[in-house]
RNA sequence: GCCGGAGUAGCUCAGUUGGUCAGAGCAGCGCUCUUGUAAAGCGCAGGUCGUCGGUUCGAAUCCGACCUCCGGCUCCA
């Protein structure tokens, strides 16, 4: 038979030849390096027999899918070691993931795992790797598979097979055996365990079986694997570096914010952090006002009646802080939309006013589960750069497009790359499907009209409408939602909102929810991680620091400070009796963008010696010129001087 | 909320099997130095070892409950 190689050449092989045979025919070096084979684009085991006329490519460590392959191998080796060390353990699933692999286990009652156990598990894994046990694939009937795993009391495997039968009507399942361990697995795998050359177990965590919180909690062991020790070390080094960019650490080091056990999930903003926060609020206003937004202020606390109208009482109550006064139930607002609807409904509206665009840096409280709180990225008390647009249905496309334009204009200022997601109707929702159809269609066409790339997340929409979300990742690669544009036909109906049309009849407006930063808290958190705490000059909490060389220059330093402060710059004087080297070092560590050094020469010449953070000495210049440069950089929102 | 881990000075961390173990560095404060582009020197002060309860002659150390934090899961801006 003949198969085609990636370069177009044909290879002649005996009938029934496998991928391994093909690799060996091409050359002994390739045979040694081969991990798997791609047959007509699909990744397969080397041991799989090839079909005549197939297009094949031998997969080696250089292939981009190879890492995922050996990580999956590593997951099986992990399960091999764990089943050996902990008799009676049940195994669930163990896939490769973006940064490594995991395997979920259900340990016997009373047995728990901690990272202290990694040493011996890793040692057992290393033995199986050293033994270079082949991965043997076997296709068996469903009955045989069920019998095998029932015999081993592996209920999760049994459940997986039963589901395969139910959902995909399979008649057979594939098993992979390496050494003493046999797993239900689709494959493919590398030829043997020996290919897992550099691996490390990283953490142990709980995970619900099949990701559902009413299922049992399993024990998940995370690890990673690479082809070389050097790659593994580089990854561990990268994780170490990421810790230095953790926004919680930067917030403390830069005196931006802090937390207290007396109000878990709520940041305390220190003066420098408050300056950053407020400047972002100012930017939001600056962006929104020319685009026709009008700012409003609405209450924090509402009668439960309001949340009945908005649907929150039914669908969101779990996340709300509820109190009462004179036996009336009240709740702190978890979103601004009900208040904005109420405000809209308190006045009459004509079609001539539409769209009405209410914006509000609204303070929200959400009763997030304690285990989900995470620095500034997941809090219970936060401010959204929120706005609600009330418009006619005809205006929806333009308004959604306007929101997308505003979003991209905003992210561009920070040099942020965002990922778009379109989320559609969830199971828990209000309103009939015809309206959902229209709303989802409107958002989708807004994206396709501008040829924007997005991921579709079915079922992830808000309970009142579908949404387009903007995502960014933190220093450890975790994804966080920032902005959102949500289309809502339900809440205006719940509030009985209306406007008088040109036809003199009452019409129901459509509402668009939109936030760009999302919450200021989360945005600042992500921005700190993105910049490593080196905020751009216009946003830096201390934009410049004046460093007098000796005490006799203190007076002049104070004059320089006042001059800059008069121009609206955030500036400090380091008046300590320390060496200049020390003052520079401390200013560098505080990531202050600009240092202005004042000594005898500068006093005499009316100059300042300018030094940029990580940019070194820029030389002396007249004070006026330094001020002009600083102001210019701030106005242009430049990265630095 | 669930699983696992952790909590010693403002920060980073020591503290072997319960018995001068309450320590170090940095930060802070004081004094001296008056300094030219990433750390001057000396000294002082600072913690009821997360909280509460228990075991013990004796607990930072052992046990329990609770609180908070960390890593995940579910959920979410």
Image (cartoon, coloured by chain):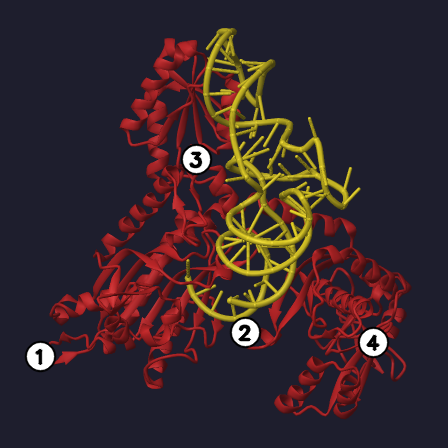
Q: Find disc 1 in the rendering and name its residue.
A: A504
**Does dot 3 land on a helix, a strand or a loop?**
loop
Q: Chain of mark 4?
A: A
Q: Find disc 2 in the rendering and name its residue.
A: A213
Taking depth in this image into account, of A67 and A584 the one nearest to the observer is A584
**Does dot 4 land on a helix, a strand or a loop?**
strand
* Other-residue count near label 3 (Cα within 10 Å), few / some / many at <14 / 14–19 / ≥20: some
**Does dot 2 land on a helix, a strand or a loop?**
loop
User: Can residue A387 be spotted in the picture?
Assistant: yes
Q: Which chain is red?
A: A
Q: Which mark is residue A640?
A: 3
Taking depth in this image into account, of A348 and B72 the one nearest to the observer is B72
- Contact between labelled residues 4 and 3, with CB atoms less than 8 Å apart: no
Earlier in the chain: of badge 3 and badge 4, it is: 4
* Residue in the image at 74% along x and 67% along y: A75
* Residue in the image at 37% along x and 40% along y: A637
Taking depth in this image into account, of A297 and A153 the one nearest to the observer is A153
């Amino acid at each position: 038979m003949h198969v085609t190689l990636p370069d177009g050449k044909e290879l002649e092989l005996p009938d029934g030849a496998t991928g391994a045979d093909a690799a060996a025919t091409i050359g002994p070096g390739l045979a040694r390096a081969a991990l798997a084979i791609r047959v007509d684009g699909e990744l397969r085991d080397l041991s799989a027999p090839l079909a005549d006329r197939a297009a094949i490519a031998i997969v080696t460590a250089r292939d981009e899918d190879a890492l995922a392959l050996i990580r999956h191998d590593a997951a099986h080796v992990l399960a091999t070691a764990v089943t050996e060390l902990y008799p009676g353990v049940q195994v669930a699933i163990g896939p490769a993931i973006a940064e490594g692999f995991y395997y979920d286990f259900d340990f016997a009652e009373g047995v728990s795992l901690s990272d202290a156990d990694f040493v011996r598990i890793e040692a057992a894994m290393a033995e199986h790797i050293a033994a270079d046990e082949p991965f043997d694939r076997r296709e068996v009937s469903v009955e045989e598979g069920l019998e095998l795993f029932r015999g081993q009391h592996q209920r999760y495997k049994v459940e997986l097979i039963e589901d395969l039968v139910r959902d995909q009507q399979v008649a057979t399942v594939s098993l992979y055996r390496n050494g003493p361990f046999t797993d239900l697995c689709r494959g493919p795998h590398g030829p043997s365990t020996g290919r897992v050359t550099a691996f490390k177990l990283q953490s142990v965590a709980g995970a619900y079986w099949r990701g559902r919180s009413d299922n049992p909690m399993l024990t998940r062991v995370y690890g990673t694997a690479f082809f070389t020790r050097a790659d593994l070390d580089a990854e561990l080094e990268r994780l170490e570096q990421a810790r230095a960019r953790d926004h919680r650490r930067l917030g403390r080091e830069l005196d931006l914010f802090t937390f207290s056990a007396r109000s878990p999930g709520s940041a305390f903003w220190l003066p420098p952090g408050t300056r950053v926060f407020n400047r972002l609020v100012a930017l939001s206003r600056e962006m929104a006002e020319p685009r026709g937004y009008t700012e409003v202020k609405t209450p924090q606390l509402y009668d439960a009646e309001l949340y009945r109208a908005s649907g929150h009482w039914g669908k969101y109550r779990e996340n709300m802080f509820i109190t009462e006064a004179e036996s009336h139930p009240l709740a702190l607002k978890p979103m601004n939309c009900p208040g904005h609807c109420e405000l809209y409904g308190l006045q009459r509206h004509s079609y001539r006013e539409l769209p009405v665009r209410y914006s509000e840096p609204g303070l929200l409280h959400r009763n997030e589960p304690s285990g989900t709180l995470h620095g500034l990225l997941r809090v219970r008390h936060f401010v959204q750069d929120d706005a609600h647009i009330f418009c006619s249905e005809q205006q929806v496309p333009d308004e959604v497009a306007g929101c997308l334009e505003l979003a991209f204009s905003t992210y561009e200022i920070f040099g942020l790359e965002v990922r778009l997601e379109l989320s559609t109707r969830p199971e828990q929702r209000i309103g009939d499907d015809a309206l959902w159809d229209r709303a989802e269609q409107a958002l989708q066409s807004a994206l396709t009209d501008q040829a924007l790339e997005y991921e579709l997340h079915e079922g992830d929409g808000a309970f009142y409408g579908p949404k387009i979300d903007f995502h960014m990742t933190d220093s450890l690669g975790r994804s966080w939602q920032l902005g959102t544009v949500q289309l809502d036909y339900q809440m205006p109906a719940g509030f009985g909102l209306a406007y008088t049309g040109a036809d003199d009849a009452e019409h129901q407006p459509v509402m668009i929810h939109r936030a760009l930063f999302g919450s200021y808290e989360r945005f600042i958190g992500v921005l700190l991680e993105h910049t490593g705490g080196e905020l751009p000059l216009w946003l830096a909490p201390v934009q410049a620091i004046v460093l007098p060389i000796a005490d006799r220059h203190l007076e002049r330093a104070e004059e320089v400070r006042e001059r800059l402060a008069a121009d609206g710059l955030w500036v400090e004087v380091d008046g300590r009796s320390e060496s200049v080297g020390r003052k520079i070092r401390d200013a560098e560590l505080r990531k202050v963008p600009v240092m202005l050094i004042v000594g005898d020469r500068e006093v005499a010449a009316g100059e300042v010696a300018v030094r940029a953070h990580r940019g070194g000495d820029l030389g002396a210049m007249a004070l006026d010129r330094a001020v002009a440069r600083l102001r210019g950089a701030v106005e242009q929102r430049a990265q630095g001087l």
